[in-house]
Structures are given as C-alpha cells and as structure tokens.
Amino acid sequence: MRDPTTTELPDLQTCEQARLSRDARFDGLFFTAVTSTGIYCRPVCPAPPPRRENITYYANAAAAEAAGFRPCLRCRPELAPRNDVLRRGDSSVAQALRMIDAGMLEQHSLADMARHLALSDRQLRRLFVARLGATPMQVHSTRRLLFAKQLLSETALPITQIALASGFRSLRRFNAAFQSAYQLAPRTLRKRPGAGAGADKVLLLRLGYRPPYDFAALLDFLRARALPGLEQVDDVSYARAIGSAERPAWLHVSAMGQGEHALRLALHGVAPTDLQGVVTRVRRMFDLDADPHAIAAVLTRDAQLRPLLRRHPGLRLPGAWDGFELAVRAVLGQQISVAAARTLAQRLLHAHGPRITLAAAAALEHLFPSAATLADIDPATLGVSRMRAATLHALACAVRDGMVDFEPARTLDAWETRWVALPGIGAWTAHYIALRALSHPDAFPANDLVLRRAAAEDARALSAKAMGARAEAWRPWRAYAVMHLWRNAALSGRST
C-alpha cells in the first residue's frame, strides 16, 4: 500500500513497476518498506521482491525510519542518491533541507533554523511532515546514521572516529542512537564480508547517482577550467587539493566501473570531523542527486532543447568546490575567454595561494587564497586591470565581512540582490556564481553572449530580454538548459 502521509511519491503503479524491474532511474525517489520484516529497501534491491500486500512505499529514508523500519543490509539505502527535487528551489522545505545538509542542526537548534526561515519551529515541523513524512530532526538523525553506516561498511575508521564523523559528540550517544534505530550495535557491521576495506589515511567511498549520468561531459567542462597546482583533471578523473595550509588534504573522483551507478571518492588526509561536509560538497559539485527524468520532462517540451537532451541525456551542473574561489574566477572571466580567465586565475593562485606538500600528490602544490588573504592585498599588485582588481578587492572584503556569503538557504532573488550590490558584479556574474557555487537549478545568466547565440534561430544573438522570456518555459531547470546550450555551442565550435 502507499503511505498516505507522504506527498512526494511517484504514483503507485510506477512504484510497483520500478521495484519489480529494479529500475535504477527511481533509486532514491522512493523506498520499499516490508511490513513482514520491518526492513526498508531501495527499488534496486537484489533480494526477491516481497508480496505486494506486505509493501508500504515511502518517499525518503527518514519517513521509513520514522515509521519504525530499519535499512536493508543488502541493498544499503545509504548508497541511494537523494531526491534532490525537494532540495532545489526556494520553498521553505528546500531551504531547510539544504541547511540540514550544510550541518545547521549540528550546532544550532530547530528553533534557530526556523527563525532563519521566518517560521516557527511548529510550522517547520508541520511542513516537513506534510511534504516528507518526517520531522526536521528525524531527517537530520537519519542522515547522520546512514552516513555512519556507510563508513562502518566501507572504511577501516575506528568506531570512535565514525561517531565524530557522523556528528555525534560521544561514542556512548552514537552507540545508543545506532542501537535504537537499527537494533544492532555498530560493531556488528564490521563482521560482515567486505567491511573494513581501506587504509587508515585513504578512505574509499561510493557515491551513488541516478542514470543517465554524463561524467565525461562534466570532466570536459572542469578540465577546460582546471588550475594546475590546485586541480588535476584527465579523461577519467578529477583531483584537487583541499583542507588548510596547516593540514592539507586531497581528493580524487572517478567512475566506479563495472556497471555501477556510482562514483568512487578517494579521500587522503581528511580529518574525521570533516568527512560528512566533504562528501556533501562532492555530491553537490558533481550533481549526484539530480533527477534527470524530472529535468527532461520540462526541457524536452522545447523543440530546440529536445534533440540536445537526446544527445546528452545525463548532462549535469558542474559545481564548484569553494564558493569564494568560484566567485573570484567568475570575476576574472568577465567578458574574456575561458582560456584567458584560467591564465589570470592561475597567476593569482601561484602568487597568493598557500604552498603545500602532499606526498602522494606532488602535482597538487597550492591551495586557493582565502577571502581574508585577498582582502589584505594591495589591489594594484593582483596583476589584472584596475577595475577588475577593485572588484576582486571589494568581493574579498564583502565575503570576509559577511556582507555576502554562500549560504544554501538563500533564495535566488535574494542572492542576486545582495551580489549585484557589489561594485563590478552584474546579473551575469551573480547567476553564474549561483549556477556553480550553489548548484541552483534555475540560475540563468541571461546576458551570456554564447548562450544568446546558441538559443537564436538565426545568426543574430537574442537580446537578454528575449532570452529571459524564452527561458520562462524552462523553469525551474533553466540552469540545465544553459548547460545543454553551452555544451552544444562548444561541440560546434561556437563558444569562446
């Protein structure tokens, strides 16, 4: 039967067909709870399908756990991509989910989060139960425990460090929460075949996605903009330096292979307390939680976009690791080519980025300079034009002083308003930053010349006003339409 409290499920017939055929396109879009066993599974679970009368469908793992079900140890619900449709957009629930992902409830109360959204905590709980079938705290708790379950299953981290990595401040509380939710002790998972794989300093994790996923196209985009010394991008993988000058680390992302719908994340030297934040940022950077079919359902209504989506059905948003870094690079890229912007960014990196030494990744030798660092540098020494240097200095000061930020809870309109108030920042720059630093699905740099040419039906570029009017039909996925048009322009040699 279908859970009547949850409103975000596919229709019952679709759920039935998807679970019986183990359709990976629906992985994470719903979960199958089995009333006879008390277990909930992904639709791709390889176990024999239960009888229909024993099934209850839930739209997310938190709702299933709130109803008293435990995660399957065979299909491992912690590996399912999230239903990102709810997290994308400007609704209160979407903003709150992004805040939970950013760790808001690790340090603050539910009342604090509700006030940030101009709601009462009671209103926020009611919205969550109506939309998700679970309260904000239940969503937060499920997120922590499933991440701990993945670390227990896939790494050799000591259980004490896993407790810290998943947001618990004491081992006792972690053990009690895990036992209460899953009716087994954390150490039990270490007895399972394959548990404990990995080394103390290198953690290997699987990050799932829904097919189709065009990893090659995303790497092409990142490779054209990669900064030597900070990043390495080849045909099959992405690597970059992260962390701080005092404790540098690095990550490496590649495809899992063997037909798995997942990326392989290797983390080197990352502190346990930083693990969940790093994984969250990588998932956003590689747009792993997008639902390509929900996006295509809107964009294929456009006759020009339809063949582009058929050609590249798994195109995703290329996120950025760090918001400030992306903002600086966006300013450097104003009205010049990608190659020229990369040259300017590399010059800035080598002149002002902290030097680091990574024994296993000698080519990664810089971190990007912080806002505080660039704010203290004489703009005349930045090696760019006077006007661009002034914009960079104003940007660095604004980020350092909290005048602008990269908070995930901002609405797109509020984001644009704050950013265009800075000198030298226009709508194009604000929306480009939102597209990549926030991975906002509706960000739309309407003034982009390549975009206006690509969308035109003849040789003349559309005006920004006409471009904006044309894109109204693409909401709430305008950013994905941008990527398809940019990709097509690049392949046809019409981009710069």
Image (spheres, rainbow, N blue to C red):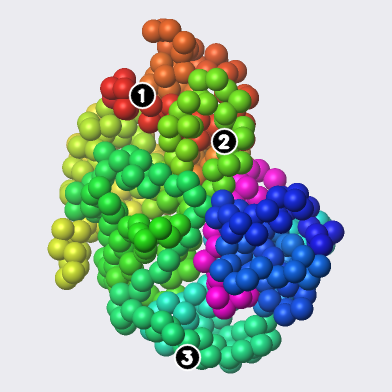
Q: Residue at x 18, y 42 (%)?
A: 347
Indicate the secondary structure of the residue bearing disc 2. Answer: helix
Whether residue 138 is visible, yes or no, is: no
Residue occupying image coordinates x 33% and y 79%: 198
Q: Is residue 91 rendered magenta in the image? A: yes
Q: Crowding at label 3, few (<14), some or many (≥20) Cα neighbours within 10 Å? A: few
Residue 191 is marked as 3
As rendered, which of 75 and 60 lies closer to the eye?
Answer: 75
Q: Are marks 3 and 2 in contact (CB under 8 Å)?
A: no
Whole-percent x, y for residue 232 in the image: 23, 52
| Separation of residues labelled 1 and 3 (CA atoms) | 52 Å
Q: Could you tell me which quadrant the N terminus lies in?
A: bottom right
Name the mark on residue 296. Answer: 2
Sequence-earlier tag: 1 or 2: 2
Q: Label 1: how many residues lie within 10 Å, few (<14), some (14-19) or many (20+)? A: some
Against 456, residue 153 (above or below) is below
What secondary structure do most residues of the magenta stretch adopt? loop
Is 56 drawn above or below residue 297 in the view shown?
below
* Image quadrant containing the C terminus: top left
Q: Is 65 in front, or is 325?
A: 65
Tell which circle, 3 or 2, labels the residue nearer the N-terminal end. Answer: 3
